[in-house]
Image (cartoon, rainbow, N blue to C red):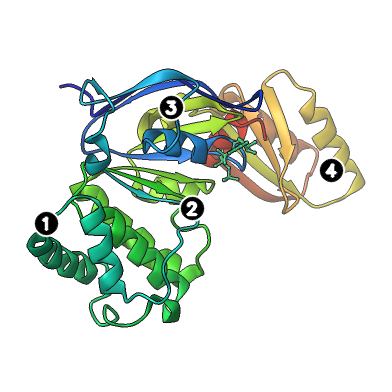
Amino acid sequence: MQPLLQVSGLQKVFHGQTSVDGISFDMEQGRCVALLGPNGAGKTTTLRMLAGLLNPSQGSILFEGKPIGKDYRKQIGYLPQSPSFYNWMTGEEYILFASRLSGMGRKESVGRAAAVLEWMGLQDAARRRIGGYSGGMKQRLGLAQALVHTPRLLLLDEPVSALDPIGRREIMDLLREIGRETSVIFSTHVLHDAEEVCDDIIMMNRGRIAEHGTLSTLRAKYNRPVITLRIEERKEALQWLETLNTRSFILESRMEVDGSVLLKVQDMESARSVILREAAEHGIPLLRFEAGSLSLEDVFMEAVGG
Ligand SMILES: Nc1ncnc2c1ncn2[C@@H]1O[C@H](COP(=O)(O)OP(=O)(O)OP(=O)(O)O)[C@@H](O)[C@H]1O
């Protein structure tokens, strides 16, 4: 099947500074893709190029196999990071305005605006001025605006980052629903949000793709055994921990915020038996011993060099 989107060597340079540095990826129809990365990674710039709002310095974007052209804007819905609204308009007027801008006829606009406002839970507020909406309501209105013309691809720039926990939950629940009906790319710097709604993750850092794959392939790829250990802070125990760090079966160790030590090990079975045997022999007061594997959070931190 032909990918919905084929991005190849996409680059954006602003005043000699490269913000997006030759990224390439394909996106299948019906997928939800999270563009995940820290501040300044190039997510907004990428989304603006994908939305056709910014010309790439180099590279190409093919939508259903064709270069993006005049009609492309009708195929996509875009919600910018900080959408601005006309506060004097009512929600309904704004959505009708957005639908007309996207080329829909008057009659069709009216029906579709009502449907999308209801879907976003704004039917009761539809005749109120946007100036009186909460942050969460404005974001739902932004989603309604992006969805009103039934786009084939929805591009959402950090749709939950400015919201309080309740607003965030509302939008995340809606995103999961929307993802069942439409292909979605949304940017976030929060891994948990990406995991919650998306099938695929593109990890960006410094304008490049650091990792790309489905959640399960990324988890499998980085499925390295780790042991988390916490001991009572006694001199002999701490000395033992220091010697442990120098052993060849430990690939890497890191202190966690709660005082635990996270040990990436070569082989779980042998590492576990050595550590437990030595702890028993030396009478090390273990407070925590946990055998597991790297979380996607660790993968993300590794990929972005955190
Ligand atoms: N219009 C512009 N002119 C000059 N530099 C820009 C412009 N837009 C973005 N940049 C720069 O490009 C880099 C990437 O910015 P971008 O906003 O795409 O990152 P981001 O991943 O979306 O980050 P954030 O989460 O902070 O929004 C940054 O260094 C930014 O300063």
What's the residue type where badge 2 is placed? Gln
User: Mark 1 sits on what residue?
Assistant: 105
Element class at badge 4: helix
In terms of depth relative to the viewer, which is nearer, 109 or 243? 109
Q: Residue 231: horizontal and vertical position, in percent?
A: 76, 48
Q: Residues within 10 Å of mark 1 (few under 14, many from 20)?
A: few
Residue 5, position in %: x, y?
Answer: 28, 28
- Rounded to the nearest angstrom, the CA distance separating label 4 from label 3 is 41 Å
Q: Is mark 4 within 8 Å of ligand 1?
A: no
Q: Does the residue labelled 2 lie within 8 Å of ligand 1?
A: yes
Residue with the mark numbered 3? 212
Question: Residue shown at 53%/32% (left/top)?
Answer: 204
The amino acid beneath tag 1 is Gly
Quadrant housing residue 242: top right
* Label 3 SS: strand
Residues 167 and 95: in front is 95
Marks 1 and 3 sit apart, C-alpha to C-alpha, by 40 Å
Residue 121 in view here: no
Q: Earlier in the sequence, mark 2 or mark 3?
A: 2
Counting residues from the start of the chain, the first of labels 1 and 3 encountered is 1
**Which callout, 1 or 4, points to the residue nearer the camera?**
1
- Which quadrant is the C terminus positioned in? top right
Q: Earlier in the sequence, mark 4 or mark 3?
A: 3
How far across and how far down the image is residue 144, in percent? Answer: 28, 61
For disc 4, the neighbor class at 10 Å (few under 14, some 14 to 19, many from 20) is some
Q: Is mark 2 on a helix, strand or loop?
A: loop
The image quadrant in which ligand 1 is located:
top right
* Residue mark closest to the camera, 4 vs 3: 3
Is residue 294 rendered to the left or right of residue 80? Answer: right
